[in-house]
Amino acid sequence: MIETFVNFGTPLALKQAFIDEIIKAQDVVDLYGPLQNAIALEHSTIPPYLTAMFSLKPGVNDLIIEFIRGIVVQEMLHMTIAANILIAIGGEPEINTPNFIPKYPGPLPMGIGGEDFKVGIEAFSMDLVKKIFMRIELPENPIALYSANPPSTIGAFYKELKNKIKELQPPFAHFNRQVTSKTMKKQWFTEDKLFEINDMSSCERAIDIIVVEGEGTSTDPMQAHNLPAHYYRFKAITQGRRLIKCSNGQYGYFGEAIPFNVEDVYPMKPNPKIADFNNKPAIQSRIKQFASYYSNLLDTLHQAFNGDPALMDKAMGFMYDLRVTAVGLMQIPLGDGKNAGLSFEYIPLKER
């Protein structure tokens, strides 16, 4: 049965201490840590989303691949926006460190979801979308739900961050170090999405993009260009139909069919680590190669966010190039009914 537009569940809460850190901030430098946390959070969903997308074989599942790819690109945009805000107020993003990547399976940055909420690196499944991806993206104020005591959510984190920046009124600068659509040769992001953070107005607008694209608004599940926010796109996948606005003004999953063939998913071993394959050196070498490529991506992002914004084109290219290596890995049988998979471990440059 296709569900109408109703949400169920409670948005994932983060540890209150991370919001309190923002509230207690007395100086702009006190916001460097929270903004670094925001960068880490926006990045943390990219590896599990990428893995699910790469595990889908082209063909019947193409529309699902398209949906997830769009979400991944927006997560990269949100990560870049958070980095630009940190740069604009004088901070320096830290991207290429082992601790920047979450330990999968495990909790997301800032303790989101609590210790019992584990996000892993797994092949696509409807269960994964329902139990993990939709939980990650569940809005702070889902339509048709109300709470008198809202939890400490991702949306609340960004709301407090915006309020505190407005209160502290930092001087916005370092414009030549920010990554914008104008510093990129390829049009990965439009000017209305990735722009210079040069005053409070542009800062507020940038934060709103992160929240609305991820959550929608309290009255509308759509973001710009009539695309559903992330939660509603994932839910559309599970419903097998696109979300559309009905003749009565309400939304429902009654649009174009979103087909799914479970046979067209590579049976990837969940949460593989390089060390798991010490007795299979050929496979271990391939997995380490993938992790090295991802480490190259993080290195390039770090350089782009720390003085060389033109490198963002190269970084985005790396992300797309990962697919070739990923799909090759996922086609290698391990002999137990599972195939090899992806490891998002940071490998220091001298060890690659």
Image (cartoon, helix red, strand yellow):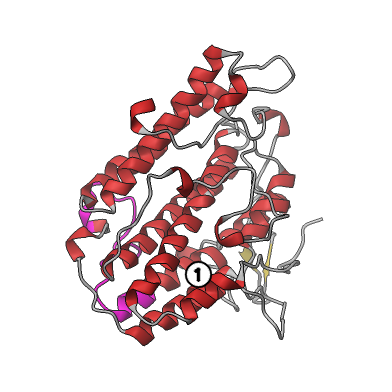
Q: Quadrant of the N terminus?
A: bottom right
Tag count in the figure? 1
Q: Residue at x 53, y 77 (%)?
A: 20
Comparing 28 with 140, the one in front is: 28
In which image quadrant can residue 153 be found? bottom right
Q: Residue furthest left?
A: 176
In which image quadrant can residue 299 be found? top left
In this picture, which residue range is highlighted in magenta?
Answer: 182-205
Residue 159 in view in this figure: yes
Q: Amino acid at mark 1?
A: Val
Q: Quadrant of the C terminus?
A: top left
Q: Which residue is mark 1?
A: 212
Drawn side of residue 178 relative to residue 37, left or right:
left
Residue 176 in percent (x, y) is at 17, 61
Location of residue 48 with respect to 255 vertically, above or below: above
Disc 1 residue crowd, few under 14, some 14–19, many 20+, Cα 10 Å: many
Location of residue 294 with respect to 146 vertically, above or below: above
Drawn side of residue 325 relative to residue 177, left or right:
right
Assign a secondary structure to mark 1: helix
Location of residue 122 with respect to 287 vertically, above or below: below
Location of residue 234 with respect to 152 vertically, above or below: above
Q: Residue at x 42, y 36 (%)?
A: 294
Q: Main secondary structure of the magenta part?
A: loop
Residue 240 in view in this figure: no
Drawn side of residue 328 relative to residue 249, left or right:
left
Residue 111 belongs to magenta span: no
Q: Residue at x 70, y 34 (%)?
A: 261
Q: Residue at x 43, y 83 (%)?
A: 163
Residue 262 in percent (x, y) is at 72, 34
Residue 346 in percent (x, y) is at 45, 37
Residue 285 in percent (x, y) is at 49, 18
Comparing 238 with 46, the one in front is: 46
